[in-house]
Image (cartoon, rainbow, N blue to C red):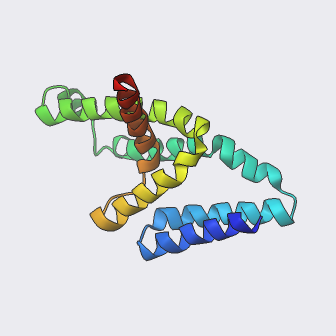
């Protein structure tokens, strides 16, 4: 039981040092759920987050991306024009590849949970050293799946 708290505390501290506030907030939330689970008997909250948190996060992220449509910054005309420009076609392709990576990333994380710390370290390093944003673990899992599939194909 203590090792889980120490590991989450280490993630929290490293994220704070690395100015990765997304991971800081996530670690705080999980620590609160862990305390509630261990000491208050609220095991269902931690279980729910483990089973449904990813979908809830994707819903919130997608809602945030849709706001420019809702506030009129992006119009239907802009959306149609995206099919006519080079950057639009590249963005559509990137979105397609990201969705495919995410689609195989979830099963990879579920079947190989030991890969999650490496994905978190990579994401935190990307935020710290390259000024990235911590939306990477899911897509990173998908890229990991693709690379491992290529390696296993040739070995």
Q: Above or below — where is 21 with respect to 148?
A: below
**Residue visible at 43% across and 34% down?**
145
Q: In the rendered image, which quarter is residue 72 located in?
A: top left
Image quarter of the N terminus: bottom right
Question: In the depicted view, which residue is nearer to us: 74 or 98?
Answer: 98
Total labels drawn: 0
Residue 96, x across and y down, in percent: 33, 29
**Left or right position of 82 against 111:** left
Residue 26, x across and y down, in percent: 57, 61
Image quarter of the C terminus: top left
Can you name the residue that lies furthest to the top here?
153
**Residue visible at 42% across and 61% down?**
124
Question: In the depicted view, which residue is nearer to us: 37 or 65?
Answer: 37
**Residue visible at 67% across and 48% down?**
49
**Left or right position of 115 against 7:** left
Q: In the rendered image, which quarter is residue 38 located in?
A: bottom right
**Left or right position of 111 against 146:** right
Question: In the depicted view, which residue is nearer to us: 51 or 117?
Answer: 117
Q: Above or below — where is 83 with respect to 126?
A: above
Q: Above or below — where is 46 with respect to 26?
A: above
**Residue visible at 58% across and 39% down?**
112
Can you name the residue that lies furthest to the front here?
155
Q: Above or below — where is 123 with respect to 91?
A: below
Residue 126, x across and y down, in percent: 34, 59
């Amino acid at each position: 039981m203590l090792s889980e708290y120490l590991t989450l505390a280490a993630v929290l501290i490293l994220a704070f040092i690395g100015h990765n506030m997304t991971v800081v907030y996530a670690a705080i939330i999980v620590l609160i759920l862990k305390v509630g689970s261990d000491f208050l008997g609220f095991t269902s909250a931690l279980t729910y987050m483990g089973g449904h948190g990813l979908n809830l996060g994707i819903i919130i992220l997608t809602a945030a991306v849709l706001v420019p449509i809702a506030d009129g910054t992006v119009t239907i005309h802009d959306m149609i024009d995206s099919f006519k420009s080079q950057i639009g076609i590249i963005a559509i392709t990137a979105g397609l590849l990201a969705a495919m990576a995410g689609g195989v990333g979830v099963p990879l994380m579920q079947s190989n949970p030991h890969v999650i710390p490496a994905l978190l370290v990579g994401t935190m390093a990307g935020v710290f050293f390259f000024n990235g944003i911590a939306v990477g673990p899911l897509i990173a899992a998908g890229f990991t799946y693709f690379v491992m599939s290529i390696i296993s194909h040739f070995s």
